Amino acid sequence: MNPTPGKPPTRPRPGPAVALGLVILCIEGYDLFILGAVGPSLLSHPDWNVTKSTLGLLGSLTALGMPLGSIAAGWAGDLYGRRLPMMVSLAWLSLSMLLSAVAGDLALFGATRFLTGMGIGALIPLVTAYVSEAADPARHSLQVGTATTGLAVGGIVTGVVGRVLLPAWDFRTLFLFGAVPLVLIPVVWRLVPAVVRDHPAQTPPEAGTETAAAGPDESANRLRRLLAPQYRRSTLLFWAATFAGLVIVYGASTWLPTLMVDNGYDLGSSLEFSIAFNAGAVIGTLGAALVADRGLLKAATIVGFLLAAVAMVVLSTPQPRPLLLLVSAVAGFGALGTQALVNIYVAHAHPARLRGTALGFSLGVGRVGAIVGPSYLAAVTVLISSSKAGFYAFVVPAVLGAVLIGLLRPGRRASAPAPAGDSSETEAPLAR
């Protein structure tokens, strides 16, 4: 039966939800990676006196905004439903990118990157939660994973656009493409439900029917619920695993090409490496999601972290170019793909009315890893003179992430919100 015009269907269908999530995160990936694409143009700007340290500061400003966006949007998504916060976040992101395009000085440009970071941080938990609630339970990991590959696809698009248009175009023109999210706002209004609803198959029969968005009294207790005895262990492990994963993601995006050049690789085409890295994230995430949907989400996530460690060890020794690109693809999955699996795991482990908050805080706290990652790699390369030291520095958070996920134990997820202070809530089975 067709829904009433102007109103979303009672429950989102998986296909449109995955497609919308993929497009949103693709645009978000473009906005996230655009700073790297315009870096050379910024360095040659005649008036701004940009240095490599300045570029690092701009990247840090973007990263600093992301935890604020993640926590606020995850919380708001559980309180008001996914639709309104998603529309506000898309408008916020578009406005921030447009301000970047017209920024007349470096200080204003830096402020717009902080605002952009908030928008980027907001959309990841909202989109992940929305697609998770629309997904077919039998294909949950594959459908959520497909949407989250948008970040890597956006990274590829950014590299291609930068290669084709720069330096012939003013670098600020590329930020105008960031206004595209505005056209998605009516689509979000049409497709995204106004209230939070879990999939019936994800809720035990005795839990009753669908639940709407929680009221203000209940929303105040969401963080307390995440840290209550029934969730505390998994919450802290997810936060720490996200921290480890984002150390790898942001450390790799900042330092991996430099480490490879210092180790004797000829990376004449940074675009070629970028495509291999991001393509590996896309293909690896989809393959791992297929495995995860066979009840092996935990195992797939652990293997993803370990593959990141193996890839870094292999890259520390000279390899022929075909193997170099293959291992770069494995590194892309180990970094971006594994973090996508962690996000899927967090979404899978929480009921709808707590999912946004769980994702928001996991990504918000974990974003400290995005800030620490580049500095951690820089410190290792300065303190240890070996050209291989930087590669081995990645192995530490990769192995740590695998151990943290391995410590998660089966439990039963909450099927319905418990009253404030009620610790009798049970957890649904986590994936093996």
Image (spheres, rainbow, N blue to C red):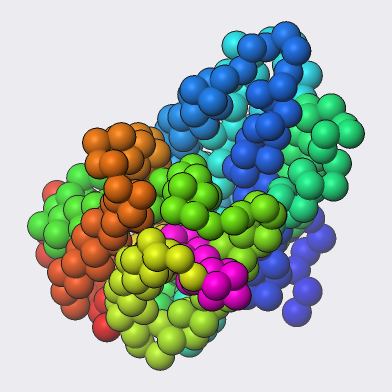
State yes or no: residue 89 in magenta. no
Residue beneath the point at 62% across and 44% down? 33
Residue 146 on image: x %, y %: 59, 71
Q: Quadrant of residue 149?
A: bottom right
15 or 314: nearer the viewer? 314
Q: Main secondary structure of the magenta part?
A: helix
Q: How many marks?
A: 0
Residue beneath the point at 30% across and 35% down? 382
On screen, residue 48 above or below 331: above
Q: Quadrant of residue 413?
A: bottom left
- Any part of residue 230 in sight: yes
On screen, residue 153 above or below 169: below
- Is 170 placed left or right of 185 in the picture? right
43 or 38: nearer the viewer? 43
Q: Quadrant of the N terminus?
A: bottom right
- Any part of residue 182 in sight: no
Residue beneath the point at 60% across and 11% down? 107
Residue 336 on image: x %, y %: 48, 60
On screen, residue 11 above or below 155: below
Q: Quadrant of residue 313?
A: bottom left
Q: Which residues are magenta?
A: 320-338
Residue 94 on image: x %, y %: 71, 35
Outermost right residue? 168
- Is 118 placed left or right of 31 in the picture? left
State yes or no: residue 332 in magenta. yes
Residue 279 on image: x %, y %: 62, 68
Q: Quadrant of the C terminus?
A: bottom left
- Is 71 placed left or right of 56 in the picture? left
Outermost bottom residue? 294
